[in-house]
Structures are given as C-alpha cells and as structure tokens.
C-alpha cells in the first residue's frame, strides 16, 4: 500500500489509520484540505475487499468534500472517514465511541457526520467521546435528506430556467429515479410546483405511495433514461450517466441528488455535446452540508433552508460561465472550487493565485 503516491492522494494534509483492539475498529480518516475551515465529511462503513480499496475510497471522497464545501461557499474544508466492516454485522456503540476518540485527537481539524452505512444513532455514539461531530439529533440537524431534496428542487428550477427558459415548473416533466429519503421529498416539492412526475424504483411500496400521493406515472427501472421528460433526476445510484445511458436520454437536463453521477469525467463533455445541461452532482446535492454549517445553539431552520435554496444561484453561475468558456459544467465546477481555495491561500501566504 502506498499513500503519498496513491492515485487519489491529491496532496492530502493528513491521513490517519485508526486501530482499536478492544472494539475491533479499523478505520481511515482523511483530511484533504483545511484552507477554508475545519474538514467536514461523513463516515462511511463498508466491507471493503482490501485496505487499498478503503484507502482509495476515503482519499477520493475526502477531496470531493473539499470541492463540495468550496463551491457551496462554506468556510469548511474536506475530509472523510471509512470504517472497514459490514454495517449490518459489525456495528456496536463502542466501535463508534472508539472512532470518536480518534476524531477527538485531531483537535477539531476534522468534523465527522453520518454517511453510507452509518446513521444519526451511530453519530450519537461518536458524540460520547468527541464534540467534533455534526448531524446528530441532539444539538444537530439530524437527517439531511429534507435539506438535500430542497437543494435539488432549487437546482432543478435553475436548470430549467437556464436550459428551457422557463421560470416555472408548471407542466415540466421530471423523471425521478429512486424514491428513497431524497427522491420522495423531491417529488412532493416538484408536485407542489406543478411539475409532471415520471418515477421509478425497485420497491413497489414506495412506487405505490408516490403514485397515490402525486399522481406520478411509473416506468420500469431500465426505462427511466428513455422516458419522455424534460429533466432526468437521478436519486438512487452513482455512475448512471455513462456510454450506455447517454444515447438513451431524451431529457434536456440531468439534475438529481445521486453522488458520482458521471461514470467518468468525460461523460460531462458527452452530455454537453448532446446539448444536455448537467447540474454537477456535488453542487446540487450540497443541501445537507449547508444546513450542517448552520448547526449550533442558535440553529434557525428557516435561515438554513433559505441558504440551501441558494444552490440554484450557484448552479446558474456555473452554467453561465461554462457556456461562456464552452466548457462542461462538471469541469467548470471543479475549477471554481479550486479558484476559491487558491484565492484564500494567496491572500494568506502572499503568493499569486494560479
Ligand atoms: P435511499 O437509499 O433512501 O434511496 C434510494 C432509493 O433508490 C431507494 O428507494 C431504492 O429502492 C432506489 N433504487 C435503488 N436502485 C434503483 C434502481 N436501479 N432504479 C430505481 N430506483 C432504485 O437514498 P437517499 O438518501 O434518498 O439518497 C439518494 C441518492 O442521493 C444516493 O446516491 C445518495 O448518495 C445521494 N445523496 C443523498 C443525500 C441525503 O441527504 N440523503 C445527500 C447527498 C447525496
């Protein structure tokens, strides 16, 4: 295993390998960049096939958090934790308390939150041994999904305005892939705004509920890409924008909550070449981290959700600049994230920003 020369190292500030014999905890905490503030990022628990796989994942996700907070305009850096283990078999409160002790040793450089395979309850256990934890239900904002859905809704509005020239979602057709925590709430906002819904999931109960509540049309999971809609909103899986699906897309816009929607970066260019507007995933799905940045004793939910709604404005900036430079929107988002960090570093260290 190599760290400094790893494919995803990307100049990380700190990588901590955590081993707790008593609880069996094996975790890696990666702190990518704290230029803008403390590194905030979730803790993923996954039965990784190898330590190398866990390391690559944490490094990649941690850098992603740096970019997400930077573009969202937050004074937060990027970090992430992975726990090597099966979330259905290996979880104990003690394991998460042990993780909290490692987080605590970082002295606030890194703040942990929930992610795939971990829950708000697990973060309550982490809180037993550190205050550097976000998104708990006590003193925290809890489940981020409503905020994520609210941000995606405003992102879809901004995308529709830019690509279709419409200020309203009335009678705009939106395909929502995945009716889980985010997808279902997104459907409720879209329905309220007058959009027509086409939905898909692999579970009948959520499909029936969405059909009954919002009059949604249902399509089979393998038919979502070709659905005759204005917007395709991926809210289930990653890598759904790929060589197979792009030719099927009828929608003029891809805008949804899923992480890592593009199978590869080049698919951002492929969308642009087909005249499909792509709302970069980490920009449109930043609602959770935006509300977490408001956490504290004076937490004001309305102010936090108003802040989340500005995700639409951030996307509009990206769309305009991407058009101006004839650049894919995912490339432009990365550039804007890097520019903000470079400007702060330049001001701090007195060197010219690149
Ligand atoms: P979830 O697990 O609650 O919901 C996912 C839904 O997708 C489930 O209903 C599942 O049955 C469905 N699904 C799975 N495979 C499918 C398929 N092939 N076709 C159609 N539906 C399928 O997850 P969530 O919290 O709603 O998150 C959705 C996506 O958004 C994930 O990619 C997640 O990483 C991302 N995301 C979520 C948040 C959040 O706040 N929850 C924040 C940022 C990003």
Image (cartoon, helix red, strand yellow):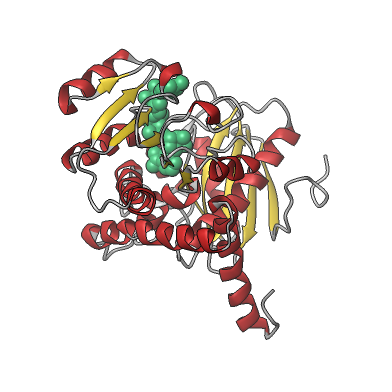
Q: Which of these two is toward me, 350 or 223? A: 223
Horizontally, residue 5 falls left or right of residue 109, namely right
Q: Which of these two is toward me, 114 or 153? A: 153
Query: Is 344 drawn above or below residue 242 in the view shown?
Result: below
Place residue 265 in its image quadrant: top right
In the picture, which quadrant includes the C terminus?
Answer: bottom right
Query: Is 60 drawn above or below residue 343 in the view shown?
Result: above
Q: In which of the image's four quarters is ligand 1 placed?
A: top left
Query: Is 185 drawn above or below residue 337 in the view shown?
Result: above
Horizontally, residue 129 falls left or right of residue 173, namely right
Place residue 39 in its image quadrant: bottom right
Q: Which of these two is toward me, 302 or 41? A: 302
Find the residue positioned furthest to the bottom: 350
Place residue 250 in its image quadrant: top left
Query: x, y (%) of residue 172?
Result: 26, 39
In the picture, which quadrant includes the N terminus?
Answer: top right
Residue at 54% x, 57% y is: 333
Residue at 72% x, 47% y is: 8
Query: x, y (%) of residue 350?
Result: 68, 86
Tally of numbered discs: 0
Is residue 104 visible in the rendered image? The answer is: no
């Amino acid at each position: 295993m190599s760290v400094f020369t790893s494919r995803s190292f990307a100049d990380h500030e700190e990588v901590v390998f955590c081993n707790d014999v008593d609880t069996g905890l094996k975790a890696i905490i990666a702190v990518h960049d704290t230029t803008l503030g403390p590194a905030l990022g979730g803790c993923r628990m996954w039965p990784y096939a190898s330590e190398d796989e866990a390391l690559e994942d944490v490094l990649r996700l941690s850098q992603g958090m740096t970019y997400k907070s930077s573009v969202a305009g937050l004074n937060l850096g990027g970090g992430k934790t992975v726990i090597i283990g099966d979330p259905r078999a290996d979880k104990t409160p003690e394991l998460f308390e042990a993780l909290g002790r490692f987080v605590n040793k970082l002295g606030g450089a890194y703040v942990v939150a929930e992610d795939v395979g971990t829950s708000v309850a697990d973060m309550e256990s982490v809180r037993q041994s550190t205050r550097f934890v976000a998104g708990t239900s006590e003193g925290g904002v809890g489940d981020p999904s409503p905020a994520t859905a609210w941000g995606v809704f405003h992102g879809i509005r901004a995308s529709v305005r830019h690509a279709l020239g419409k200020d309203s979602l009335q009678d705009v057709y939106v395909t929502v892939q995945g009716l889980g925590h985010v997808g279902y709430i997104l459907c409720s906002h879209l329905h309220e705004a007058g959009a027509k819904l086409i939905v898909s999931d692999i579970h009948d109960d959520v499909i029936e509920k969405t059909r009954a509540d919002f009059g949604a049309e249902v399509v089979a999971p393998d038919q979502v890409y070709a659905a005759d809609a204005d917007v395709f909103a991926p809210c289930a899986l990653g890598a759904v924008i790929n060589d197979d699906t792009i030719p099927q897309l009828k929608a003029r816009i891809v805008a949804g909550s899923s992480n890592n929607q593009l199978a590869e970066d080049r698919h951002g260019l492929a969308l642009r070449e087909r005249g499909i507007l792509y709302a970069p995933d980490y920009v449109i799905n930043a609602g959770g981290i935006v509300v977490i940045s408001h956490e504290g004793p004076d937490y004001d939910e309305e102010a936090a959700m108003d802040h989340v709604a500005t995700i639409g404005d951030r996307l509009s900036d990206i769309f305009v600049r991407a058009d101006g430079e004839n650049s894919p929107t995912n490339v432009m988002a990365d550039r804007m994230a890097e520019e903000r960090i470079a400007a702060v570093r330049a001001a701090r260290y007195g060197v010219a920003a690149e």
